Image: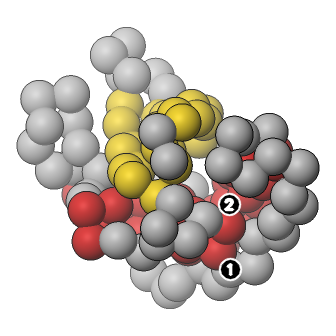
Amino acid sequence: MAARALAAGVRLDRTVDPQLAELRRRVVDPVVASVLTTDELESVVVFEEPTGHEVRATVVARGEPSYHYLQMRRSLPAADEELANRAAQFASELEDYVAESGFAWGEQRLARYTIPPA
């Protein structure tokens, strides 16, 4: 994955948030790396909505943004099964985004990733 795409999770004030960074490291980055090539990927941002109740990810590939809901709270789920469920949902959405994108229209890409240990 491109170095510019590896920035940690950020707060709205652009400071690094350790919990968002860990959610990104364990859920978002492995999925993104398995679906998009380094040439396609431009950026990934994991952030908390201003209300403080939702965590979302924005992925930009070849100039086309996609927006993904990740979970309700900023903290990581306690159980690995819950993390796996979050990753699977995100992977499904990212696969759909790629298939409907201008740069890979109609391609079926399957996310094959491993969730790194804590």
Q: Residues within 10 Å of mark 2 (few under 14, many from 20)?
A: many
Residue 110 coordinates in the image, percent (x, y): 83, 69
**The C terminus is located in which quarter?**
bottom left
Residue 64 coordinates in the image, percent (x, y): 54, 36
Which residue is more in the foreground, 11 or 43?
Answer: 43
For residue 85, the mark is none
Residue at left 89%, top 49%? Answer: 106
Confirm whether residue 31 shows in the render.
no
Residue at left 69%, top 40%? Answer: 102
Residue that label 1 marks: 113
Q: Secondary structure at mark 1?
A: loop
- Could you tell me the amino acid type at mark 2? Ala
Side (left or right) of 23 relative to 7: right
Residue 14, compared with residue 113, is above or below; it is: above
Side (left or right) of 116 relative to 94: left
Residue 29 coordinates in the image, percent (x, y): 48, 67
Q: Residue furthest top?
A: 51
Side (left or right) of 13 relative to 36: left
Q: Secondary structure at mark 2?
A: helix
Indicate the quadrant where residue 49 lies: top left
User: Which badge, 1 or 2, comes first in the chain's sequence?
Assistant: 2
Indicate the quadrant where residue 67 lies: top right
Residue at left 51%, top 49%? Answer: 61
Residue 86 coordinates in the image, percent (x, y): 68, 54
Side (left or right) of 39 relative to 3: right
Cβ–Cβ under 8 Å for marks 1 and 2: yes
